Amino acid sequence: MGALLDPRTVDPLTLTNLVRSLRARRTGPVTAFPGAVNVVGTGGGIPTFNVSTAAAFTAAALGARIVKTGSRAHSSAYGSVDLLDRLGIGLTKSYGETAAALDRHGIAFAGYFVYPVELTVLARRILPLPMRTFGRVLNLLGPFLPVLPGTRQLTGLPGPELLPLARSLAAAVDDRDVWLCTNDIGADELIGFTENTIHRGDGTVLRLNPGDLGTAAGTVGDLAPVTEPGRVVEHFLDVVSGRAGEVATQTVALNAAALTIAAGQQTQWRPAVAAALAALRDGAVRDLVGAVGAGSAGPVTAGGRGGRS
């Protein structure tokens, strides 16, 4: 059964039809979020810290409207939801709650209500597999499943070999324009020290390299995730304060720049990266993380989960 869930052995049309069918079964009212952008990776690449979550906060601090989706970890130590738990930031439980959070802070973390309920049935009843096995498929399909009408979505892939499948899956998403990203090192986000390729929904392809962006040289080790549970929050707060090293800071800034460009706020990459770097270094991003955490459960601190008991 595990082999049947290996995306490398399944016809892309089969998985695309599954995504299209699950999205079509959505019932009840749905709220649109014009101008909003999502950033979510498919996982499965080289391990990095939560770049997309840091980038989401950075882009929101710059004025972009961000409605982010994500999941718990299946192929890494901490997924975006695991990190938010530790920050004391809750997921929204409805479209109304999402709209309120977006209006209040410019960023909202959409909860499981945006996903098909059938996923839970599949995981618990139909497929008697370890969650890690099912999780590999959820990581790949997850970015394309939420019913979350917005403007665009930035989704990273761990390798160009997944592009044919990802393009097919993106075609099943009719409520936002999906941009797919790959790079030379196999990370599912844009990386400041290597060449990146963005495949836009209109079929155009954009190539970004460090020389054009003015970003620093680095290695995968500069982006390594924290493995000690007690340091996850501390490290993330260092990241969003621009104190986690130049390579980490510039990588977050590059992903945030992509979100501001996807949102139509910026048109040029270098100025967009520069604005993101400034927001990270002057405390604007860290302040936003604290404000969102205070609104959810109490002040975000390096010691844990804010005011949540």
Image (cartoon, grey):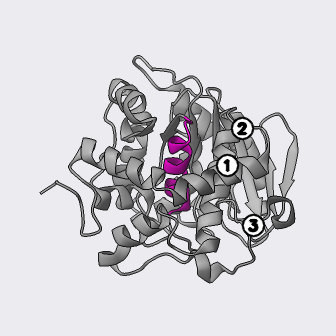
- The residue range painted magenta reads 50-64
The picture places residue 223, in percent across and down from the top left corner, at 58, 74
> In the drawing, what numbered circle is on residue 266?
2
Earlier sequence position, callout 1 versus callout 2: 1
> In the drawing, what numbered circle is on residue 232?
none
| Magenta highlight on residue 57 | yes
Q: Amino acid at mark 2?
A: Gln
Task: Tell me if residue 165 can be seen.
Answer: no
Q: Residues within 10 Å of mark 1 (few under 14, many from 20)?
A: many
Decide which of 279, 102 is in the foreground and name it. 279
Task: Tell me if residue 145 can be seen.
Answer: yes
Q: Label 3, secondary structure: give it.
A: loop
Question: Which residue, given by chain and number where applicable, does mark 3 sit on?
Answer: 215
Question: Which residue, given by chain and number where applicable, does mark 1 sit on?
Answer: 257
Q: CA distance from mark 3 to mark 2?
A: 18 Å
Residue under the image location 31 percent in, 58 percent down: 87
Q: CA distance from mark 1 to mark 3?
A: 13 Å
Residue under the image location 30 percent in, 46 percent down: 90
For the residues labelled 1 and 2, say whether their Cβ atoms are less than 8 Å apart: yes
Q: Amino acid at mark 1?
A: Ala
